[in-house]
Image (cartoon, grey):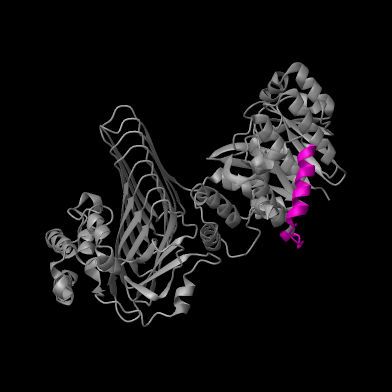
Amino acid sequence: MSLLKIENLKVNVNGNQILKGINLEVNPGEIHAIMGPNGSGKSTLANVLAGKEEYTITEGSITYLGKNLYEMSSEVRAREGIFLAFQYPVEIPGVSNANFMRTALNELRKYRNEEPLDAMDFLQLMREKAKLVEIDKTFLNRSVNEGFSGGEKKRNEIFQMAMLQPKLAILDETDSGLDIDALKIVANGVNKLSNENNAFVVITHYQRLLDYIIPDFVHVLYKGQIVKSGTKKLALELEEKGYDWIKKEVDLQPINN
Amino acid sequence: MAGELINNILSNFNEFENKLNGSRLSAVHTIRKDAFDKFKILGFPTAKDEEWKYSNPGFVHQYNFKLKLNANDDGITQEIVNKYKFENLDEHLLVFVNGFYSEKLSDVKPKKKQIILGSFADAIERNSIEILKYFGKFAGYIKNGFTALNTAFAQDGAFILIPDGTVIERPIRLLYITDAREQSVLTMPRNLIIAGECSNFKIVESSHTIGAQPSFNNSVSEIVMDFSSNVEYYNIQNNNENSFYVGTTQISQQRGSIFTGTTITLKGNYIRNNLNSLLDAEACETNYNGLYFVADNSFVDNHTLIDHAKPNCNSNEVYKGILNDKATVVFNGKIIVRQDAQKTNAYQTNRNILLTDDAKIHTKPQLEIFADDVKCSHGATSGYLDRDSLFYLRSRGISEEMAKTLLLNAFASEVLEKINIAELRDMVKNYIADKLIKDDVYFCDVLDQIKK
């Protein structure tokens, strides 16, 4: 059984059709990269998978572990193992990272009929995972993302992913705004977490991240459709030639609505 | 019905005077009579009065409140009092029944005999110097009918005198119990709190009604702070849905004094808080912290006034509120910086979160600045919970209910963290958590727990 199966997915935002029939299948152990120019619908796809409410699915289906994803609230999706690393993580003053993660982890454990973690075990786990993404201990006491630099916010997303151990992680432009050192830390975090039981969908604008996270498949999203799929080579080709040749190819043909 | 309470009050005053016998000619009673004359002219405020525009106290005409003129604590047992104590809090407890001090139910244990934690009625007899010096001198009754009425009937309440250089660790608790089991009741406690030079203490006030009949507490407190004194004053409002409250607290500060007033409003039918400070000396500091978390049809009006009359003083005011159901809230924060009050720093914020479309907030900052070398700011916001924050928390597996609790506690924490009495802070935190979430889940800060 595939982990995620998206069939002919069409999505509207405020009456505008953004996704125009997406097909994508993700199996455990795979890393998929979704690339594409600005405004092609990459973030919409990520948010739809995480269950953001402003999006209306007009056609098609998303099946996750054999279940219809529409019927799950965003918290249930998370507890079932879906994780979105946000492009723009929000700042939440007054809620500490420690309290946030402990609440999330214990909600997850409750869902699986497991006992909540006691404070010592939790703190130990948190320190261990913080080390993985090279974040300072003091960060645990600070409010979620408040006053964090762009890079710290992205590392915090990977930290949360490491804490929650999802089955399907979607990274929405996690590389944007990162310098090369931070990029390596993020990529290293992903590579350490990746195994044959989980899968990653890495949304990115640039090829750069894919030097560190090696994808099994690369898809190009343009005007709300996946217009090309291939291997790592496709990403290199895009790096070399840009998106124009794909745009040209697509724009010459009428889009099937 | 209209006017019935007024008529009753007129005959109450005759009854009250007859009871006084010889002390009718006393200086205290001269002030009462003057206030009563003012009340007869003023009556109760109406919505036509600018200061009461959004908080029309129409309830005074709706119910036939009976003013209690005599002390009687027979019906109140220790068990009833215990219900209103804060868990694990060691306090000096002063209990008032229908506005009258109850020696039987109180538990005060001052270390020095110069410290007075007692009743206003006793003080009229024993501390006439202080009473005459301060009574009615700060809480003006010329414009406010409620204050005039309270002053006219000022008989009992708390009299707190903390001598120079005295630090009191235990909070001083003023617990007002109104017995409305048989009839609707009007109580009018009158408090005078005197902080000597360099004294330092905390006061916690709360009103509770037993019984289902309506109750109206019209309370006035005068707080007089001498040189370099430090007073924290907490007003915890968590009464029943048939309770009405108008409270006026007037603070007068001398040089170097620090006053911190914290008003926490959780429940009640109608609550009007007038909190006023006069900074009539240099180097004073005034902090007002407010948190209201109200639901149902509750009405809350926080009217504050910080009057900077002298240079080099600081004031900082933070009021935050969470409004559920059909609650209506007014915040009116006035800051006056007089011409003489150069180098004043005065800051004010009022932030509100509305949980429903039916909740209403009227917020009005009023800055009147006559000095030119000052730093003043104010900010007021109201809105709903941030959808992006909610989604972020939920996308990590946190239920909507729990996500709201986390966000609202974070919102309230700015005020909660300023409560310097841990037991009190926990009580308020737990109240908010209980209201928002029924499960007793892991709602505690993990790092706090580790430290313990």
Q: Is residue B45 above or below residue B243?
A: above
Q: Is residue A9 visible?
A: yes
Camera-side residue: A183 or B421? B421
Point out the residue furthest to the top here: A241
Q: Residue at x 36, y 82 (%)?
A: B74
Q: Residue at x 36, y 67 (%)?
A: B118
Camera-side residue: B192 or A162? B192
Q: Residue at x 49, y 60 (%)?
A: B170
In magenta stretch: residue A141: no
| Residue B271 position by quadrant | bottom left
User: Would residue A43 appear left or right of B68 to someone viewing this image?
Assistant: right
In magenta stretch: residue A120: yes
Point out the residue furthest to the front here: B113
| Residue B116 position by quadrant | bottom left
Q: Is residue A55 visible?
A: no
User: Would residue A108 appear left or right of B242 to someone viewing this image?
Assistant: right
Camera-side residue: A192 or B4? B4
User: Would residue B1 appear left or right of A123 to someone viewing this image?
Assistant: left
Q: Is residue B335 above or below residue A219?
A: below
Q: Is residue B333 above or below residue A180?
A: below
Where's residue A147, x and y in %? 59, 34
Where's residue B121, x and y in %? 28, 69
Where, quadrant-wise, is the C terminus of chain B in this rendering?
bottom right
Is most of the magenta stretch helix, strand or loop?
helix
Q: Is residue B130 above or below residue B366?
A: below
Where's residue B71, x and y in %? 29, 77
Where's residue A168, x and y in %? 77, 45
Camera-side residue: A94 or B112? B112
Q: Which residues are magenta?
A: A110-132
